[in-house]
Amino acid sequence: MDILPFDQTHISQAAALFVQSFQTLRRSQPILPDLMANPQRVRDKLGQLVERQTGLVAMEGDMLVGYMGWFLVDGFRGTERKGAYCPVWGHGAADVARPVIYRALYQAAAQQWAAARCGVYAITLMAHDRELDNTWFWNGFGLAVVDAIRSLTPLNDAEPEGFSVRRANLDDVATLAALEAEHTQYYSKPPVLMAPQPPHDEDALVTFFRVPANNYWLAEQDGQALGFMRFENEEFGATEIVSARTTIAITGAFVRPAYRGRGMAVELLDAGLRHYGSRGFARCSVDFEAFNPAARAFWLRFFEPVCYSLMRVPEYVAPETPAPRDDADSV
């Protein structure tokens, strides 16, 4: 088996490998949109990796048996680290000897990631493939983010007890901004400990509401806002296999700690599912950090994982080598 640079001649075979694996996932999750089952769509995406020259292939003679491509991302996940990220469509391997193929690709890719001084390595896998999960686990990767999906079937017919749920509007921007600030602070505290992120401020919320499909739902008691759930049609960061015009994505959810355990998040979710189900949407998606225990426990009650994103943070990143000094510059 030879490991070679990924070029234009490899795109069609690589796309066929991905589509075959994606179709396997869709058989167990038929609610997924079929956009990424289109080989041309995958070929177009793989062309991005060829243009950047950030990819490798595993070849047996003239046959491509595996491929891996990535993006180099500065400030990965809001940190100061540079990351190498391999998206779900950016890798694939033949069914025979897949662990061996992936191991060879990773060993070669890691050389390039280290040379680029990446402080994070990340890859997104389809959730049906336990053998592949195990392969990356044994390469030192751990679970970071889960993409999950569900139908828009309502959850229950019970009325909220002691609180109400309603759809928010522009008059609620100041209230939502205050809740979003609390929401953002939560993620940088133990046990989640994510890099601090700027909250959605009032200007950002006004822009958000200008998009027709975008909505917040608010949980209130005695006129006080206690929690929200945010829905939008286009989300940066979600895995491509769930993205479609008929997918509504949950991009934020928060209930003030003192009011948790009363079913507010369930009622917020139910309100959104009913709304979008009546408006022609086909599915609801969410992505969440696996290391957020409260979020993980909630979302896995109602959603089925379709992708796992794994990360490795290498202990050592070589410092940048200073450029050679030209003695003429010191004269």
Image: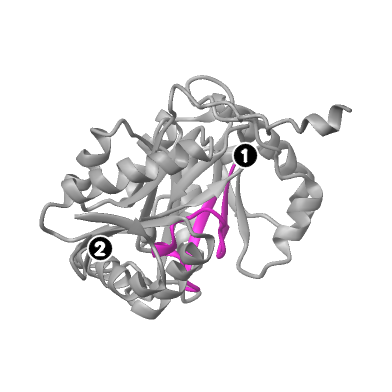
Of 189 and 176, the residue lying toward us: 189
The residue depicted at 37 percent of the width and 52 percent of the height is 148
The residue depicted at 33 percent of the width and 57 percent of the height is 4
Q: Give the tally of numbered discs.
A: 2
Is residue 52 found left or right of 39 in the rendered image?
A: right
> Where in the figure is residue 117, as x and y percent of width and height?
53, 35
Whether 243 is among the magenta residues is yes
Secondary structure at badge 1 equals loop
The answer to whether one can see residue 156 in this image is no
Of 93 and 7, the residue lying toward us: 7
The residue depicted at 22 percent of the width and 53 percent of the height is 128
Mark drawn on residue 75: 1
Q: Say which quadrant the N terminus sits in.
A: bottom left
> Where in the figure is residue 303, as x and y percent of width and height?
34, 51
Residue type at mark 2 is: Gln
Q: Is residue 83 above or below residue 217?
A: above
In primary-sequence order, the first of circles 1 and 2 is: 2
Q: Say which quadrant the C terminus sits in.
A: top right
Q: Which residues are magenta?
A: 228-251
Secondary structure at badge 2 equals loop
Query: Furthest-right residue in view?
Result: 331
> Where in the figure is residue 306, as x and y percent of width and height?
31, 54
Is residue 177 found left or right of 141 in the rendered image?
A: right
Q: Is residue 235 above or below residue 288?
A: below
Is residue 24 found left or right of 298 in the rendered image?
A: left
Of 15 and 33, the residue lying toward us: 15
Q: Which residue is mark 2?
A: 29
